[in-house]
């Protein structure tokens, strides 16, 4: 399910100095969402990475930013793990775990996340008897990577700064 290089590069030609198209960030009625998003909420995203991830629009803005960097697989893996941990059916657990492993963890996976060999191998061993915690170490590594690398860049990005200025403009 990899996006072709032409499609990936095609979006680069649409970039401008300003990020005014918030439809990608706030898919469900961007104008209404922008009106609901307060400057305080958007500013709070800078307090911590977990605050950003826990906010509906913060998560959407971070996802849009990662897409511009072609690294959204990290967030998608983290979200898949969060969803996986809510699995209550033992019958579905193994199949869900296998899907996540094949999509994100396995070498040459279509959306392979950047984790070290030891973590990949530990996760592979965990797959022999999948449990709700079988991805914990890999998820932690990916969370840490996003927090240290992508999150600071997001806070300096045009997407975030333009979104902040949009919320502030409404106040004046």
Image: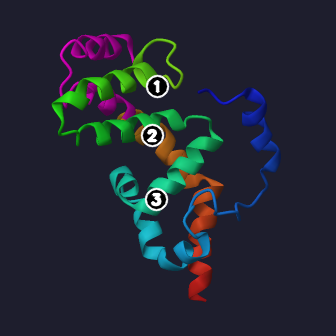
Q: Is residue 170 left or right of residue 132?
A: right
Where, by quadrant of the figure, is residue 95 drawn?
Answer: top left
Residue linked to disc 2:
75
Where, by quadrant of the figure, is residue 56 drawn?
Answer: bottom left
Q: Residue furthest front?
A: 91
CA distance separating discs 1 and 3: 21 Å
Q: Is residue 66 left or right of residue 149?
A: right
Q: Is residue 159 left or right of residue 132?
A: right
Q: Quadrant of the C terminus?
A: bottom right
Q: Quadrant of the N terminus?
A: top right
Q: Earlier in the sequence, mark 2 or mark 1?
A: 2
Q: Residue at x 70, y 60 (%)?
A: 19
Q: Front-most of 172 and 91?
A: 91
Q: Is residue 91 left or right of residue 95?
A: left
What secondary structure predominates along the stretch shown in magenta? helix
Q: Which residues are magenta?
A: 115-142
Where, by quadrant of the figure, is residue 87 drawn?
Answer: top left
**Residue 111: where, in percent of width, then height?**
52, 26
Residue linked to disc 3:
58
Residue linked to disc 1:
113
Q: Is residue 6 above or below residue 54?
A: above
**Residue 112: where, in percent of width, then height?**
49, 22
Q: Is residue 123 above or below residue 85?
A: above
* Residue 114 visible to an observer of this rendering: no
């Amino acid at each position: 399910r990899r996006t072709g290089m032409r499609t990936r590069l095609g979006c680069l030609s649409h970039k401008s100095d300003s990020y005014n198209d918030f439809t990608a960030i706030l898919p469900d009625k961007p104008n209404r969402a922008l009106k609901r998003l307060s400057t305080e909420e958007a500013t709070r995203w800078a307090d911590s990475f977990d605050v950003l991830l826990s906010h509906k629009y913060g998560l959407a803005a971070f996802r849009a930013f990662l897409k511009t960097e072609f690294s959204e697989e990290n967030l998608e893996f983290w979200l898949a793990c969060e969803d996986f941990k809510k699995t209550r059916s033992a019958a579905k657990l193994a199949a869900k775990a296998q899907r996540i492993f094949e999509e994100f963890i396995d070498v040459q996976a279509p959306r392979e996340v950047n984790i070290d060999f030891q973590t990949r191998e530990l996760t592979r061993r965990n797959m022999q008897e999948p449990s709700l915690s079988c991805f914990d170490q890999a998820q932690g590594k990916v969370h840490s990577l996003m927090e240290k690398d992508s999150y600071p860049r997001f806070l300096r990005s045009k997407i975030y700064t333009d979104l902040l200025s949009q919320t502030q403009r409404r106040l004046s």
